[in-house]
Image (cartoon, grey):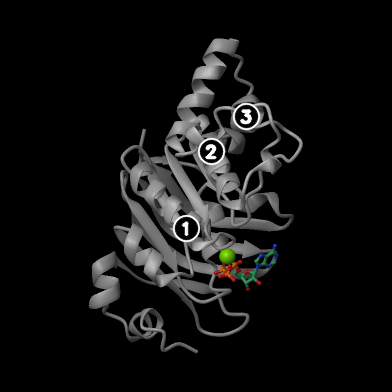
Amino acid sequence: MSKRIDVKDLNVYYGNFRAVEGVNISIEPKSVTAFIGPSGCGKSTFLRTLNRMHEVIPGARVEGEVLLDGDDLYAPGVDPVAVRSHIGMVFQRPNPFPTMSIRDNVLAGVKLNGRRMSKSDADALVEQSLRGANLWNEVKDRLNKPGSGLSGGQQQRLCIARAIAVKPDVILMDEPCSALDPISTLAIEDLIEELKENYTVVIVTHNMQQAARVSDKTAFFNIAGTGKPGKLIEYADTTTIFNNPTEKSTEDYVSGRFG
Ligand SMILES: Nc1ncnc2c1ncn2[C@@H]1O[C@H](COP(=O)(O)OP(=O)(O)OP(=O)(O)O)[C@@H](O)[C@H]1O
Ligand SMILES: [Mg+2]
């Protein structure tokens, strides 16, 4: 079930270093939101605060609120592991478990959450998740072969299948296509388009065409200089960000006149 995210006055730290400052943003359900901005402006850092992955780094912490349909993920007593089962993540490099079969890769997240199920339920979930990731037809005859035997683009779709198998509300993707060829990239973009019917999708991308193609809303982050915190500069409909932004720095960035 797709849910909305409201971020209020978020500051993100690595030890004493404030990497991201003062973010306020509302991310709509059943939509794709793109995060863009120059390297080091805190896109990945901010993304990881949305499912409490940031705090696994020693010394890392946040101030502020992240609400999932109104519930603060950082409220006392909230279990970060449960948060991550509602808000899944797909990384830059496809990272299937190499020695695990395709089938077990799809089920890995579900098993991590301690859910037990019958073989027939597991089979059904594997098929549903692989179909959802547009990978079923390519792998249905080799479900017991290792995940590492797939192409890079197939591995990334396997990771998406693993993420959706736990039936999350939100899927976060950090440059999911940066290690892929153009054909696999288009396959993932098509898939993102389908995923938004059921999920809230957030994608970090350096590819302006990709942001323009797949996202409904775009958030532009920027950084004033080395050692300064990244900030959310402008957030609007993707067409506005690309065609008629308010801020000059947004315009410079999306038109490639940057740095
Ligand atoms: N584990 C870490 N420990 C300390 N500082 C970090 C850590 N990870 C990132 N940073 C710092 O936080 C800032 C934001 O980094 P982040 O990786 O979020 O940027 P980004 O916008 O995702 O960049 P890119 O586009 O290159 O992926 C940078 O100054 C970076 O050096
Ligand atoms: Mg990054």
Q: In the current view of this chain or complex, which residue is farthest to the right?
A: 99
Check the image and report above or below for 210 versus 61: below
- Distance, label 3 to label 2, CA atoms, is 20 Å
Is tag 2's residue or tag 1's residue first in the polypeptide sequence?
A: 2
The disc placed on residue 163 is 2
Residues tagged 3 and 1 counted as in contact (Cβ below 8 A): no
The disc placed on residue 25 is none
Q: Assess disc 1: are there few (<14), some (14-19) or many (≥20) residues with their C-alpha within 10 Å of its C-alpha.
A: few
Where on the image, by quarter, is ligand 1? bottom right
Q: Assess disc 2: are there few (<14), some (14-19) or many (≥20) residues with their C-alpha within 10 Å of its C-alpha.
A: many
Describe residue 93's horizontal placement relative to residue 22 as left or right. right
Q: In this view of the protein, which residue sits in the foreground, 147 or 28?
A: 147
Check the image and report above or below for 136 versus 203: above
Is tag 3's residue or tag 2's residue first in the polypeptide sequence?
A: 3
Describe residue 229's horizontal placement relative to residue 186 as left or right. right
Position in image of residue 146 (x %, y %) = 71, 35
Residue type, mark 2 in image: Ala
- Distance, label 3 to label 1, CA atoms, is 22 Å
- Distance, label 2 to label 1, CA atoms, is 22 Å
Residue 167 showing in the rendered view:
no
Is tag 3's residue or tag 1's residue first in the polypeptide sequence?
A: 3
Count up the numbered dots.
Answer: 3
Instruction: Say which quadrant the N terminus sits in.
Output: top left
Check the image and report above or below for 235 versus 60: below
Residue visible at 31% across and 60% down in the picture: 217
Residue visible at 34% across and 43% down in the picture: 194
Front label number (3 vs 2): 3
